[in-house]
């Protein structure tokens, strides 16, 4: 099957909504979620950034704590069950991954709360293009309700039954702005680079050429010459062939090669701009120029602290605002920092630092990391030399003296 044919008409990529991948349309106030979806599907770097943020956040398990800060470990607790299986179609990981993808692509994520007899029964992610806000003139309460297009019907959802997560909008409209907006120029230039490379590949990687002919050609001869040049000199099948010109004809390049335009470095530069808009280290989306083991480890740590943790905090804050108050014995939805990808090395380093402290007991060290006491044997202090009990090494201090 021929995938790229000279006789095949070039058609723009389209979504079901009929939008073409025009990143600059994101800069228009009339931008739509459908245009953002199309850009996500057309640019591999933007897609990678969105997918990476979503998978990183959803890979961290959420937990429920009580008023004393203790984790609720009862699997039958309604809130614990809700987080693990928000609805019959999704488990917790798939649910939160979809929510974070909506946020990364559109700058907004919507979670509809389903209640039965006043109790929360399920959570459903709603695609942003299906949600429209009912604005008010009150600056303190700008949104009165949400209108959700369900396909065959329209439903008005109260504010308390819709969880809205959004990136900040500088115009303060109450609706978030996608990171794609700030990266629109970089995405547009990257897409143009790929289209240019495809066009030159179809022309045997040669730039545009000007063919000079000493004699004037009739319409029929002109079409015949053009046909023979296309068949004999263009396309991958003719790569490496020699062009033979007769009758004083002369072919002169009128464009630049990919090397002359430095497209490779330009593509990498704009990929870094896209990664910056999403808070993703360039090494994680294919920038191999600075990808060493040390740099990768530091990039993972920086990514976890600067991007993943803030996204997790935003998600948990939104859930705690709407969901947690419905459960009397639950105080907060949160997570453990040591479960964040990229911070496992930090925990090992912290364990080593605490273990090297000799003015606290083993039990105090264990307590610092959430572990229980091992009994009276863990209450002694140890000195560095031979790790003997400190009271045996310091004279004049009774063995039962607790002043240390």
Image (cartoon, rainbow, N blue to C red):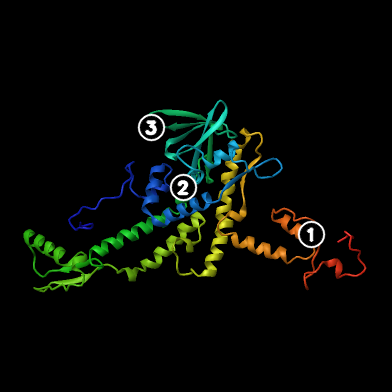
182 up-or-down from 225: above or below: above
Q: Earlier in the sequence, mark 2 or mark 3?
A: 2
Q: Earlier in the sequence, mark 1 or mark 3?
A: 3
Whole-number angstrom distance, CA of label 2 to CA of label 3: 21 Å
Residue receiving disc 3: 151
Query: Residue at left 46%, top 34%?
Result: 132
231 up-or-down from 114: above or below: below
- On screen, residue 192 versus residue 337, left or right, reads left
- On screen, residue 87 versus residue 21, left or right, reads right
Q: Which of 307 and 125 lies nearest the eye of the viewer?
A: 125
Mark number displayed over residue 377: 1
Residue receiving disc 2: 101
Query: Residue at left 25%, top 50%?
Result: 11
Callout 2: few (<14), some (14-19), or many (20+) C-alpha neighbours within 10 Å? many
- Label 1 residue SS: helix
Callout 1: few (<14), some (14-19), or many (20+) C-alpha neighbours within 10 Å? few
Hey, which quadrant is residue 159 in on the image? Answer: top right
- Label 3 residue SS: loop
Whole-number angstrom distance, CA of label 2 to CA of label 1: 51 Å
Q: Which mark is nearer the camera, 2 or 1? A: 1
Q: Which of 353 and 164 lies nearest the eye of the viewer?
A: 353
169 up-or-down from 133: above or below: below
Callout 3: few (<14), some (14-19), or many (20+) C-alpha neighbours within 10 Å? few
Q: Position of residue 357 (x, y in %)?
A: 75, 65
Q: How many marks?
A: 3
Query: Residue at left 27%, top 67%?
Result: 255
Looking at this view, name the residue that lies furthest to the top: 117
Q: Position of residue 349 (x, y in %)?
A: 65, 64
Mark number displayed over residue 112: none
Q: Earlier in the sequence, mark 2 or mark 1?
A: 2
Are the residues flagged by discs 2 and 1 in contact, CB closer than 8 Å? no
- Name the quadrant of the C terminus: bottom right
């Amino acid at each position: 099957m021929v995938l790229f044919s000279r006789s095949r008409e070039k058609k723009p990529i389209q979504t079901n909504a009929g939008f073409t991948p025009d990143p600059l349309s994101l800069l228009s106030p009339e931008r739509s979620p459908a245009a953002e979806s199309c850009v996500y599907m057309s640019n591999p770097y933007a897609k990678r950034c969105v997918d990476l943020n979503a998978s990183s956040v959803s890979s961290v398990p959420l937990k429920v704590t009580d008023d004393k800060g203790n984790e609720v470990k009862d699997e039958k607790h309604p809130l614990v069950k809700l987080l693990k299986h928000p609805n019959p179609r999704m488990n917790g990981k798939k649910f939160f991954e979809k929510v974070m993808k909506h946020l990364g692509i559109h700058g907004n994520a919507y979670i509809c709360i389903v209640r039965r007899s006043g109790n929360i029964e399920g959570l459903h992610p709603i695609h942003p293009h299906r949600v429209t806000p009912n604005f008010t003139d009150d600056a303190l309460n700008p949104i009165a309700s949400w209108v959700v297009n369900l396909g065959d019907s329209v439903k008005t959802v109260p504010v308390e039954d819709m969880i809205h997560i959004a990136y900040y909008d500088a115009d303060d409209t109450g609706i978030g702005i996608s990171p794609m907006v700030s990266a629109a120029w970089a995405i547009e230039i990257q897409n143009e680079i790929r289209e240019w490379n495809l066009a030159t590949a179809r022309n045997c990687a040669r730039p545009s050429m000007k063919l000079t002919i000493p004699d004037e050609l009739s319409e029929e001869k002109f079409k015949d010459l053009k046909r023979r040049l296309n068949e004999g000199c263009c396309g991958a099948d003719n790569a490496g062939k020699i062009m033979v010109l007769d009758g004083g004809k002369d072919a002169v390049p009128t464009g630049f090669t990919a090397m002359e335009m430095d497209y490779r470095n330009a593509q990498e530069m704009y990929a870094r701009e896209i990664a910056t808009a999403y808070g993703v280290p360039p090494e994680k989306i294919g920038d191999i120029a600075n990808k060493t083991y040390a740099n990768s480890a530091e990039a993972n740590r920086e990514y976890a602290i600067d991007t993943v943790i803030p996204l997790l905090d935003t998600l948990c804050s939104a859930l705690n605002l709407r969901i947690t108050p419905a459960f009397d014995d639950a105080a907060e939805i949160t997570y453990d920092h040591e479960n964040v990808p990229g911070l496992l090395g930090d925990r090992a380093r912290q364990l080593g630092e605490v273990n090297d402290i000799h003015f606290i007991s083993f039990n105090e060290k264990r307590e610092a990391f959430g572990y229980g006491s091992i009994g009276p044997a863990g209450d002694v202090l140890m000195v560095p030399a031979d790790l003997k009990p400190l009271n045996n090494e310091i004279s004049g201090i009774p063995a039962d003296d607790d002043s240390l």
